Image (tube, rainbow, N blue to C red):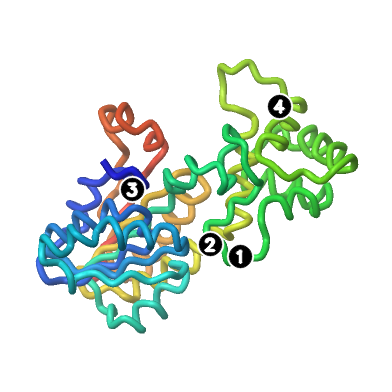
Amino acid sequence: MNNYHVSVLLQPTIELLNVRTGRKYIDGTLGGAGHTRLILEAGGEVLGIDHDQEALDFVEKDLGFRIKDLRFGEDIILVKGNFRDIDTIAKANDFENVAGILLDLGISSHHVDSAERGFSFQKEGPLDMRMDQDLSVSATDLVNALNKNELYELFTKLGEEWSARPIIQSIINARQIRRIETTTELSEIIRKAVPWSKKGINPATKVFQALRIAVNDELHSVQDALPKAVNLLESGGRLAVISFHSLEDRIVKRAFLEFEEKGLGKIITKKPVVPTDEEIEINNRSRSSKLRVFEKS
């Protein structure tokens, strides 16, 4: 099993991408290359994009001997970048008019499991959350600098958090004493503001989601990338997008409907594909994933 990231909906994604030998595919969110590995094994050529240098370093090392052994050495290109720039990256690497594009919008297992990256409220670490370490603003900066109204907009819009007001007041009270620097500090502040019986969702979940989305500008990245991705597809080419929360899925669903209305192609998945009970049992993080696929005319 890939110890960097456990990819979700692997087989359905590869089947719906309709991977063919010798055709070009773009994995815009490489992660641990779980999907890319299957595309290569099916005979496809891959342009793998990720904005996290750690992911690229892992894949280069992990796939190195596999690519050589399977004679895929010239069939994959790795590029550091954000998929919102997929058109520019594709053009620079001669990957225009491709047969398929995949965007897996989820946070990687490595990010969640690495305390030093600051994505998990269950692990002590710096309140960071930058997927691209070159970004200048971290979650710490937002928590300590935004005013009450800005925090309210952030937590309600990007986290859909109903208890935003007491959480925000608790944050403001705490940061007046000292700067909030770690994941567990913020988690404890939220826990004191919102009672939790451990039966429902942890109250820190949506706040951390909102901060992560804001730090990495995730929703705008998806909005920017989708029309660019469709333009890169050849006739019959397919765009597969895996989302993990309602905000992302809503953007993807609306974009696909708009593409269909414009006559750019057709939606292949009338209802999103979701993981089986067996996959959820093996990988609980897959439980909220949804796969939607669009085919260009």
Are the residues tagged 1 and 3 within 8 Å (C-beta)? no
Q: Earlier in the sequence, mark 1 or mark 4?
A: 1
- At 42% from the left and 66% from the top, the residue drawn is 226
Disc 4, SS:
helix
Residues at marks 1 and 3, CA–CA distance in whole angstroms: 29 Å
Tell me if 168 is positioned left or right of 122 in this view. right
Residues at marks 2 and 3, CA–CA distance in whole angstroms: 25 Å
Residues at marks 1 and 4, CA–CA distance in whole angstroms: 29 Å
Residue at the extreme right:
176
Residues at marks 4 and 2, CA–CA distance in whole angstroms: 29 Å
Eye-nearest disc, 3 or 4? 4
- At 58% from the left and 66% from the top, the residue drawn is 134
Residue 135's disc is 1
Eye-nearest disc, 2 or 3? 2
**For the residue marked with disc 1, what is the amino acid?**
Leu
Residues at marks 3 and 4, CA–CA distance in whole angstroms: 33 Å
Residue on which disc 4 sits = 191
Q: Residues within 10 Å of mark 3 (few under 14, many from 20)?
A: many
Residue on which disc 2 sits = 132
Quadrant location of the C terminus? bottom left
Q: Position of residue 147 (x, y in %)?
A: 83, 51
**For the residue marked with disc 3, what is the amino acid?**
Leu
**For the residue marked with disc 2, what is the amino acid?**
Asp
**For the residue marked with disc 4, what is the amino acid?**
Arg
- At 43% from the left and 67% from the top, the residue drawn is 83
Residue 126, placed above or below residue 48: above
Tell me if 68 is positioned left or right of 273 in this view. left
Residue sitting nearer the eye, 15 or 80: 80
Q: Position of residue 249 (x, y in %)?
A: 45, 49
Q: Position of residue 59 (x, y in %)?
A: 32, 59
